[in-house]
């Protein structure tokens, strides 16, 4: 639920091992997850909400709104990605401006800062329809400068803006269990995270961390440092495990029984052992977030040697063609560096 002010938590600064090719590429044979349409407890039934960006996450977030009785109007650059949602009851429009114009609140979930800004500032973008009485919430993980430019532009048109990046994957989105880290317009945050409103439909924890997008951008990157580093360290652990002639499944069981046990490593460890990299959160997104983190550290004149090393491994995974795979695919960066002996 929504945390009341006394309960609100302040976030300070989200090898070759001879594997058969069929195993290494198994994830490619799995299609992008279809939207989950099970009926969830209803939110405000008459609410009309816009949604821009229907990638793996955006599509599922919009689907969850539909499953809770919300009227959803969608747009995506590749229009065919709207089809499944339209069949589930959504309305598709041709431009972001049309969506914003027809909805009190519009949510966006884009891949990176460039995509977020293009949707706002491009032809027939969000800014074209922004006005008093309209609100835009961007759930993308972007840098603070891009967030501030969007905030200033939308506010300048009399509309409200909230930067509210999410933590969680598409499975969490399907269950309405995302985490939202928000900065910007406090009134919009309170309204959108109240029981029955859009963010409350899509997530079960909401933090307001500041009056500008900067705090939200920074806080989300703190989560991404930990997530990327944990999965990178796990990949290295399992690579050395196999090189040392040990059973990786058994080592994962040891980790799970120890003080180091956590759901992330348990889930990603299994994917690494199976060589199953069907996307939940992709390599290119994790590496983008680490890149943004390093840029922030550079701005603050703070060295991050561990983050820099981890980032290089995700860059290597992208070079190997794993950009669209689940970020557990960082494990395969080690495949040319070690041979089981």
Image (spheres, grey):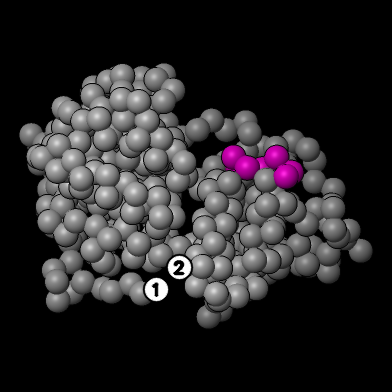
* Quadrant of the image containing the N terminus: bottom left
User: Magenta segment: does it hold 55?
Assistant: no
Callout 2 touching callout 1 (CB < 8 Å): yes
Q: Nearer the viewer, residue 14 or 63?
A: 14
The residue beneath circle 1 is: 13
**Position in image of residue 335 (x %, y %):** 80, 53
Q: Seen from this angle, which residue lies furthest right?
A: 341
Q: Nearer the viewer, residue 99 or 233?
A: 99
The residue beneath circle 2 is: 222
Position of residue 233 in the picture relative to residue 133 (left or right):
right
**Which element type, helix, strand or loop, lies under badge 2?**
helix
Q: Quadrant of residue 213?
A: bottom left
Residue 313 visible in the shown view = yes
Q: Quadrant of residue 278?
A: top right
* Quadrant of the image containing the C terminus: bottom right
Q: Residue at x 60, y 75 (%)?
A: 303
Bounds of the magenta segment: 319-325
Q: Earlier in the sequence, mark 2 or mark 1?
A: 1
Q: Residue at x 14, y 71 (%)?
A: 5
Other-residue count near label 2 (Cα within 10 Å), few / some / many at <14 / 14–19 / ≥20: some
Q: Secondary structure of the magenta portion, mostly?
A: loop
Q: Residue at x 53, y 48 (%)?
A: 285
**Which element type, helix, strand or loop, lies under badge 1?**
loop
Above or below for 247 versus 200: below
State how far apart marks 2 and 1 are (Cα). 7 Å
Q: Quadrant of residue 117?
A: top left
């Amino acid at each position: 639920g929504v945390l009341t002010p006394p309960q609100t938590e302040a976030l300070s600064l989200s090898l070759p091992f001879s594997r058969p090719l069929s195993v290494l590429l198994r994830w490619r044979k799995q299609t992008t997850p279809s939207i989950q349409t099970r009926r969830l407890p209803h939110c405000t039934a008459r609410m009309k909400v816009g949604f821009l960006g229907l990638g793996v996450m955006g599509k599922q977030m919009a689907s969850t709104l539909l499953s809770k009785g919300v009227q959803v109007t969608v747009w995506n650059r590749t229009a065919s990605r709207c089809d499944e949602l339209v069949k589930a009851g959504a309305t598709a429009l041709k431009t972001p401006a049309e969506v914003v114009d027809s909805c009190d609140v519009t949510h966006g979930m884009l891949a990176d800062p460039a995509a977020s800004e293009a949707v706002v500032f491009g032809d027939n973008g969000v800014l074209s329809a922004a006005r008093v009485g309209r609100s835009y919430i961007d759930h993308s993980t972007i840098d603070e400068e891009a967030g501030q430019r969007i905030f200033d532009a939308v506010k300048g048109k009399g509309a409200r803006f909230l930067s509210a990046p999410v933590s969680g994957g598409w499975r969490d989105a399907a269950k309405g269990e995302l985490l939202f880290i928000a900065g910007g317009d406090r009134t919009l945050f309170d309204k959108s995270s109240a029981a029955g409103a859009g963010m409350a439909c899509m997530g079960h924890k909401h933090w307001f961390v500041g009056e500008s997008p900067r705090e939200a951008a920074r806080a989300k990157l703190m989560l991404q440092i930990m997530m990327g580093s944990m999965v990178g360290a796990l990949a290295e652990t399992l690579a050395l495990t196999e090189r040392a002639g040990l059973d990786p499944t058994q080592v994962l069981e040891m980790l799970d029984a120890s003080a180091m046990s956590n759901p992330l490593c348990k889930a990603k460890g299994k994917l690494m052992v199976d060589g199953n990299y069907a996307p939940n959160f992709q390599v290119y997104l994790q590496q983008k977030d680490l890149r943004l983190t390093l840029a922030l550290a550079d701005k603050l004149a703070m060295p991050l040697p561990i983050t820099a090393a981890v980032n290089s491994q995700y860059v290597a995974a992208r070079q190997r063609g794993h950009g669209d795979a689940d970020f557990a695919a960082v494990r395969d960066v080690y495949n040319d560096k070690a041979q089981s002996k």
